[in-house]
Protein backbone atom coordinates (compact mmCIF):
# COMPACT_ATOMS: atom_id res chain seq x y z
CA UNK A 1 0.00 0.00 0.00
CA UNK A 2 1.34 3.40 -0.97
CA UNK A 3 0.61 6.31 1.33
CA UNK A 4 0.67 10.06 0.84
CA UNK A 5 0.96 12.99 3.26
CA UNK A 6 -0.89 16.23 2.80
CA UNK A 7 -0.69 19.36 4.93
CA UNK A 8 -3.82 21.45 5.42
CA UNK A 9 -3.69 24.89 7.01
CA UNK A 10 -6.63 26.23 8.99
CA UNK A 11 -7.14 29.64 10.56
CA UNK A 12 -4.67 30.08 13.46
CA UNK A 13 -7.51 31.09 15.80
CA UNK A 14 -9.64 28.00 15.17
CA UNK A 15 -10.61 26.82 18.68
CA UNK A 16 -8.95 23.67 20.06
CA UNK A 17 -12.34 21.94 20.34
CA UNK A 18 -12.97 22.55 16.64
CA UNK A 19 -9.53 21.23 15.76
CA UNK A 20 -10.26 18.06 17.71
CA UNK A 21 -13.56 17.60 15.85
CA UNK A 22 -11.77 18.19 12.56
CA UNK A 23 -9.19 15.51 13.38
CA UNK A 24 -11.95 13.06 14.31
CA UNK A 25 -13.95 13.64 11.13
CA UNK A 26 -10.90 13.36 8.90
CA UNK A 27 -9.90 10.13 10.67
CA UNK A 28 -13.39 8.76 9.96
CA UNK A 29 -12.77 9.02 6.19
CA UNK A 30 -12.08 5.71 4.48
CA UNK A 31 -8.41 5.51 3.56
CA UNK A 32 -7.17 8.00 6.17
CA UNK A 33 -4.49 6.48 8.37
CA UNK A 34 -3.60 9.45 10.58
CA UNK A 35 -4.69 13.06 11.02
CA UNK A 36 -2.95 15.27 13.57
CA UNK A 37 -2.49 18.95 14.27
CA UNK A 38 1.00 19.96 15.39
CA UNK A 39 -0.21 21.29 18.74
CA UNK A 40 3.15 22.74 19.76
CA UNK A 41 4.93 24.29 16.78
CA UNK A 42 2.17 24.94 14.24
CA UNK A 43 -1.29 24.42 15.75
CA UNK A 44 -2.92 25.56 12.51
CA UNK A 45 -1.28 22.79 10.43
CA UNK A 46 -3.10 19.47 10.01
CA UNK A 47 -0.99 16.63 8.65
CA UNK A 48 -2.95 13.80 7.07
CA UNK A 49 -1.51 10.42 6.06
CA UNK A 50 -3.79 8.54 3.67
CA UNK A 51 -4.08 5.88 1.00
CA UNK A 52 -4.70 7.63 -2.33
CA UNK A 53 -6.35 4.49 -3.71
CA UNK A 54 -9.18 4.94 -1.18
CA UNK A 55 -9.59 8.71 -0.78
CA UNK A 56 -8.53 11.83 -2.65
CA UNK A 57 -6.91 14.84 -1.04
CA UNK A 58 -9.79 17.03 -2.26
CA UNK A 59 -12.25 14.89 -0.31
CA UNK A 60 -10.19 15.36 2.84
CA UNK A 61 -10.04 19.11 2.27
CA UNK A 62 -13.85 19.20 1.92
CA UNK A 63 -14.16 17.66 5.39
CA UNK A 64 -11.80 20.24 6.89
CA UNK A 65 -13.66 23.08 5.17
CA UNK A 66 -16.79 22.17 7.13
CA UNK A 67 -14.99 23.76 10.06
CA UNK A 68 -12.89 26.36 8.25
CA UNK A 69 -14.16 27.33 4.79
CA UNK A 70 -10.84 29.08 4.05
CA UNK A 71 -8.66 26.02 4.79
CA UNK A 72 -5.91 25.50 2.22
CA UNK A 73 -4.02 22.40 1.19
CA UNK A 74 -0.27 22.11 0.67
CA UNK A 75 1.23 18.92 -0.78
CA UNK A 76 4.19 17.31 0.93
Image (cartoon, rainbow, N blue to C red):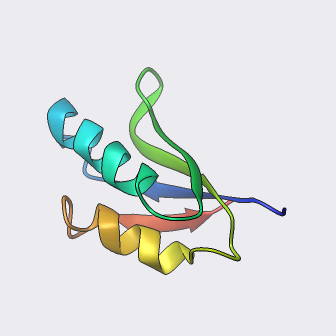
Q: Is residue 45 above or below residue 40?
A: below
> What residue is drawn where x is 48% and y is 38%?
36
Q: Is residue 15 visible?
A: no
| Side of 56 where 72 appears, left or right | left
Q: Position of residue 2 (x, y in %)?
A: 83, 63
Quarter the N terminus occupies: bottom right
Residue 68, picture quadrant: bottom left
| Side of 40 where 52 appears, left or right | right
| Side of 17 where 41 appears, left or right | right
Given residues 3 and 29, the one toward you in this image is: 29
Which residue occupies the extreme right position in the image? 1
> What residue is drawn where x is 44% and y is 62%?
29
Q: Position of residue 63 (x, y in %)?
A: 32, 67
Quarter the C terminus occupies: bottom right
Which residue occupies the extreme top position in the image? 40
> What residue is drawn where x is 54% and y is 73%?
57
Q: Position of residue 49 (x, y in %)?
A: 63, 52
Given residues 36 and 25, the one toward you in this image is: 25
Q: Position of residue 46 (x, y in %)?
A: 45, 47
Q: Is residue 55 above or below residue 43?
A: below
> What residue is drawn where x is 24% and y is 44%?
21
Q: How many marks?
A: 0
Q: Is residue 50 visible?
A: yes
Amino acid sequence: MDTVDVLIYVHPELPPETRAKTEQEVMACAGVIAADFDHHKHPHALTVLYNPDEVQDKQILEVVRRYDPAATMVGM
